[in-house]
Amino acid sequence: MIIRSAKSILITDCTILLCTVVTSLVGARALGPAGRGDLLVIALWPLVIAMVVELGLTNAHRYWMAKEPERCSRLFSNAVIYTLVVGIGSIALADLVTPHLVCQRNPRVMFLLRIYQVNIPAALFLNLMRGLLEGTRRFGWAGMARLLSFIVQGVGFAGLWFFGKLTVDSATYTLIVAQFASAGLATFAVWHQMRPRWQPSWAEFKNSMHYGLRDYPGCVADFTTLRLDQLMLGGMASSAAIGLYVIAVRLSEVTTYVSDALAGALKPEVAGARTDDQAELLLGRTLRLTIYANILILIPLWIAAPFILRILFGDSFVPATAAFRWLLAAAVVWSAATIVISGLQSFGYPGLSTIARFLSAVVSAPLLLFLLPRMGIEGAAIASLVGYSVMLLAALVALVKRRRLGFWRYLRPQRQDIPIAQLRGLAILSWASLRGVES
């Protein structure tokens, strides 16, 4: 079941990867490092604010829909109200805060940054709807909702580039259209598949917040660890440096697609397992398969790093090679940590996953402050690797202590890891990711 669900998620992720490759290729060649950096500054902070005001409700939706699907009507109704009140109010908050969080940029970039803030409620509602879909294992619909945004981006960027109209302005408006299209499809999927009734519930909202707030600091710390480097670069570096780094990040994230797919499929399977032993076996095997797959992907990408950057993006992006290689190693560690974090959440320990991610952010922030001025984007990549390593170690220790099992129960390779069915599934996952890189 988990391999089938993971395949569904990964097919979506690999299609997203192809669209991202088109978007990154066309955007990098049309805008250059500086223009690509400006686009990141515009698009990043509104999505950060959407994540901040989410308060862990997406993971709460996943958990409770996996446990008790009959909550759907109450959760859906609460999500609509929450988005209208909090999402729209967040636009005003963003307008006050974000201009002070970026370096001095030209007036046009600052104007586009304010326009892009309309995406905050759309991004918030999309995440809440995906929580409902993924919690009930409707990964196909959830994947299509995510995918549509990237298809619109890819087609839009390619069309604008073909007609010589791709600029930072037109790219920004394309991203806005893509976000609203994705949110609209997710809403249709929930309505079509689950037929929720209008049934707002204050008691249900408090129950969701009880789970969400325990996990929320971890979500913030998680995002901080994953994106703090880009956030700090946005406030300390030139647009050209940001453009180089974001391309290195996008390429390195290829190795996380398998783990993201497996982690998404893992949560409802572990939460809904009949026995603790069955859940433990599933988590351990998934963690080991994730490590195997990521190592297989890492080696060829590490060797070919400068050639990939030169062929795909041009000579102006080759200086990102060193950062790209450090980020590849960081992505392997992140992938393993993602599975362990998913296990903690699925066993009902969101607080422990929060501690692991918080420790990672605590380590990453001072490292970035120290390394960024001295080593530039390479220092940012090294800080990410150290932060992810702390998160993995802390999460694994928490899991072992709480479940009273040894490290080797999760990490020691076992013969049953690779029976024919599992080996075939792993091969499909790895091959799909590598094909995405080649494309």
Image: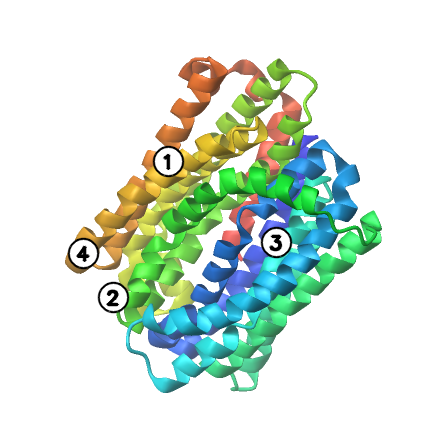
Disc 4: CA contacts within 10 A as few (<14), some (14-19) or many (>=20): few
Residue at the disc numbered 2: 236
Q: Earlier in the sequence, mark 3 or mark 4?
A: 3
Q: Quadrant of residue 148?
A: bottom right
State the CA–CA distance, disc 3 to disc 4.
Answer: 36 Å
Q: Amino acid at mark 3?
A: Asn
Front residue (pair 439, 339)? 339
Q: Earlier in the sequence, mark 3 or mark 2?
A: 3
Q: Quadrant of residue 60?
A: top right
Q: Amino acid at mark 2?
A: Met
State the CA–CA distance, disc 4 to disc 2.
Answer: 13 Å
Mark 1: secondary structure: helix
Disc 1: CA contacts within 10 A as few (<14), some (14-19) or many (>=20): many
Mark 2: secondary structure: helix
Which x, y percent locates residue 93? 46, 68
Q: Residue at x 56, y 20 (%)?
A: 417
Q: Residue furthest front?
A: 202
Pick the quarter of the image with the C terminus. bottom right
Residue at the disc numbered 4: 375
State the CA–CA distance, disc 2 to disc 1.
Answer: 25 Å
Q: Amino acid at mark 4?
A: Met
Q: Residue at x 48, y 37 (%)?
A: 338
Residue 127, numbered label: 3
Residue at the disc numbered 1: 391
Q: Earlier in the sequence, mark 4 or mark 1?
A: 4
Q: Earlier in the sequence, mark 2 or mark 1?
A: 2
Whether residue 296 is visible to the viewer of this picture, yes or no, is no
State the CA–CA distance, disc 3 to disc 1.
Answer: 24 Å
**Is residue 349 positioned above or below 312 on the image?**
above
Q: Earlier in the sequence, mark 4 or mark 2?
A: 2
Q: Mark 2 near mark 1, Cβ–Cβ under 8 Å?
A: no
State the CA–CA distance, disc 4 to disc 1.
Answer: 23 Å
